[in-house]
Amino acid sequence: MTLTDRHPMRTCALSALLSLLLVSCPATAEEAARTTPPALMLAKRYAGDIDLGAYWVSEKLDGVRGYWDGTALWTRGGSRVRTPAWFTAGWPTQPLDGELWIGRGRFAELSGIVRTQTPDDDAWRQVHYMVFDLPHAPGTFDQRLQILNRLIADNSNAWLRAVEQFRIDTPTALDARLRAVVAAGGEGLMLHRGDSRYQARRSDDLLKLKPFDDDEARVVGYQAGNGKYAGQVGSLIVERVDGLRFELGSGLSDAERAQPPPLGSWVTYRYNGLTVNGLPRFARYLRLREELPPPDPP
């Protein structure tokens, strides 16, 4: 049973809202500025059974991936990021790969700042560009990291920083660091193999370690709420790219139940493995996905 099948009187206002959400909108300035997505190195999930001594470890920042091409800043999807001129003043002409970041647990705030076409100086003063690689530099990550750290150290722009990289030798120490980062509000860890070259594809040389999995799904319907949520959305009906449909109710705020992500939009959800039927276990709504990541390079 869907939202329109139950509580018809109490869902009138919400139905009117949903009809407005379905109205087509003209292309935004951001969409007009979209270009071919940058060729970036992508991470696979950490599954253990690796030589930890061969990897650098860093915190996985919950920010917006950003590619600096030497003159302009772009998202992973190929949209131009409009920053104040002072934010990128004096940045290297060498391409940089990094993350726009405010702090732990502040992704929604950051996303709003990054999407704004007319940048707000006060808002952008909270943001840093955290650099973790040099896409076009030759050599191994060990060698690129030395160049990167020198580039940042010699640069006077206060909003340009290098991501801290450190070594961890044992699974026990890695697990302890992961738990400490998560307890402090962080998302997880990244592991980057020191002898690896920069590859514009998903690679075992770059691994992400989090206490949960996450993925994207498209909103295709709504389930009516009960009790305190009567007349609002109880859960989203979402569909993965493989066609599997399931509900997302946990994680929605009261404001999101009253004004849910529009039909056709993509959302990110987190989960803990899969059930025997292939459904995400303990699926929980995380956020609206403003820009769906481009397909992996072939």
Image (cartoon, rainbow, N blue to C red):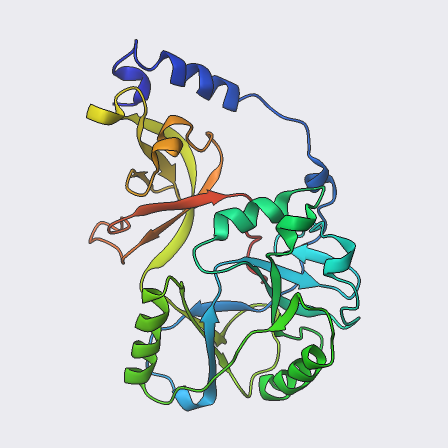
As rendered, which of 141 and 297 lies closer to the eye? 141
The picture places residue 293, in percent across and down from the top left corner, at: 55, 52
Where 56 sits versus 40, above or below? below
Q: How many marks?
A: 0
The reply, left or right, for residue 81 in relation to residue 162 is: right
The picture places residue 12, in percent across and down from the top left corner, at: 37, 12
Where 240 sits versus 168, above or below? above
Please report the residue visible at 47 percent of the width from the left and 30 percent of the height from the top. 262
Q: Furthest-front residue in view? A: 122
The reply, left or right, for residue 19 in relation to residue 114 is: left
Q: Is residue 69 visible?
A: yes
The picture places residue 8, in percent across and down from the top left corner, at: 29, 11
Please report the residue visible at 35 percent of the width from the left and 37 percent of the height from the top. 253
The picture places residue 229, in percent across and down from the top left corner, at: 26, 26
The reply, left or right, for residue 192 in relation to residue 278 is: right
Q: Furthest-top residue in view? A: 9
Where 98 sits versus 140, above or below? above
Where 231 sits versus 162, above or below? above
The reply, left or right, for residue 103 in relation to residue 175 is: right
Q: Quadrant of residue 142?
A: bottom right
Q: Quadrant of the N terminus?
A: top left
Q: Quadrant of the C terminus?
A: bottom right
Please report the residue visible at 64 percent of the width from the left and 56 percent of the height from the top. 125
Q: Is residue 79 visible?
A: no
Please report the residue visible at 75 percent of the width from the left and 64 percent of the height from the top. 69
As rendered, which of 115 and 298 lies closer to the eye? 115
